[in-house]
Image (tube, helix red, strand yellow):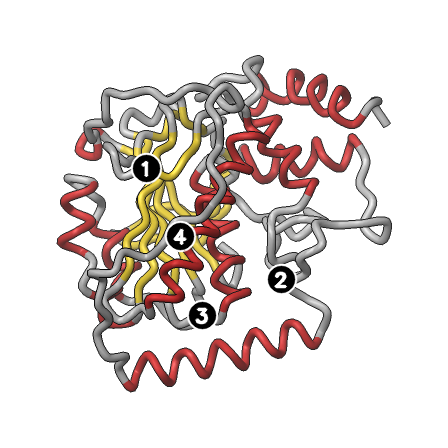
Amino acid sequence: MSGRKANAALTGAALIALSGCELFPMFPTEPVAPPTVETPEEETVAPLSDESRELAAYYRRVQDGLVAQGLLRTDGGGPDVPFSTRTLLRNFEKIALYEEYVTAGGRLVARETPSQIHRWEDSVRISVEFGASVPLAQRTRDRNAIISYANRLARVSDHPIRVSELAPNFHVFVVNEEERRALSPRLRQIVPGIDNAALTELENLPRSTFCLVFAVDPGNRGTYTKAVAIIRGEHPDLMRLSCIHEEIAQGLGLSNDSPAARPSIFNDDEEFGLLTRHDELLLEMLYDPRLRAGMSASEAMPIAEIIAAELMGGPS
């Protein structure tokens, strides 16, 4: 996690969860519909609490301050932030082969540790659930943004990723304060046996943590089977979209941050708010069939070096 985002992999036999039986065609064999989902008319909105109103004002000030400093860029990187094959390879190792958090004493602790290749083998089916007090227009905007982003991630990774309410295995919650604190029973339904440390982290989330994602690796073999992302509904549009971009990408296996990664959203400095071309290449590397879930750094990096050189057009 950066000062704004958190992610953790949850392991252990108690976290095994059933996934759906259907498989979706690999992109791009399936036509992709444009993101034009409308909010159902029967949806209603509960009143926003005073606490959420205060928090929304706070995050608006945060976003305005970041943008005034030239941060939360949405351009994806340009001539001012070049990167080489060597840089891409270094960042891949740091972001895909290290974990940001560990569980210690029943809590999630920020401690960077070596890990293994984590990714999905099953199709990724994303569902979106909103808190009762999230405005209807915001629900429509966020649904459409997630549909568009899922299509982009599928295209880049060549892995089946889509928004679907049929046997979803990647659950995205956009919730305000009271709704977030009340999520534990719903999460226990989604992930039976979920670590109490994850629920404690969620219930006691400081305002300095903007959003978070938990990904489940039941056998500690590097294969994710479920993920849950929590996005604060109080965020203004750009910060909320930034959280959507980073948390879903991290839930696909790019689970760490690095201060050296640039141009990238996997960085604590908030310079880039949305997925960059550099980040697309990291995702393309992660899902290259020459790599396998569960590979250690010593196994994966010689292969990753070849892939990076191919993507960048040379070994420099």
**Pointers 3 and 1 in contact (CB under 8 A)?**
no
| Residue identified by numbered label 1 | 164
Rendered position, 273 above or below 148? below
Q: CA distance from mark 4 to mark 2?
A: 24 Å
Indicate the secondary structure of the residue bearing disc 3. loop
Q: What's the residue at 29%, 24% (across, down)?
A: 219
| Residue identified by numbered label 4 | 143
The mark closer to the camera, 3 or 2, is 3
Q: In the image, what residue type sits under mark 4? A: Arg
Q: In the image, what residue type sits under mark 2? A: Glu
Q: In the image, what residue type sits under mark 3? A: His
| Residue identified by numbered label 3 | 235
Where does residue 253 sit, x and y in percent of width and height?
47, 35
Q: What's the residue at 58%, 33% (across, down)?
A: 283
Mark nearer the N terminus (3 vs 2): 3
Disc 2 residue crowd, few under 14, some 14–19, many 20+, Cα 10 Å:
many
| Residue identified by numbered label 2 | 270
Disc 4 residue crowd, few under 14, some 14–19, many 20+, Cα 10 Å:
many
Q: CA distance from mark 4 to mark 1?
A: 11 Å
Where does residue 271 sit, x and y in percent of width and height?
67, 61
Indicate the secondary structure of the residue bearing disc 4. helix
Mark nearer the N terminus (4 vs 1): 4
**Pointers 4 and 1 in contact (CB under 8 A)?**
no
Mark nearer the N terminus (4 vs 2): 4
Where does residue 112 sit, x and y in percent of width and height?
50, 46
Task: In the displayed orientation, state which residue is furthest to the front.
Answer: 41
Side (left or right) of 68 relative to 314: left
Quadrant in the picture for residue 218? top left
Side (left or right) of 21 relative to 258: left
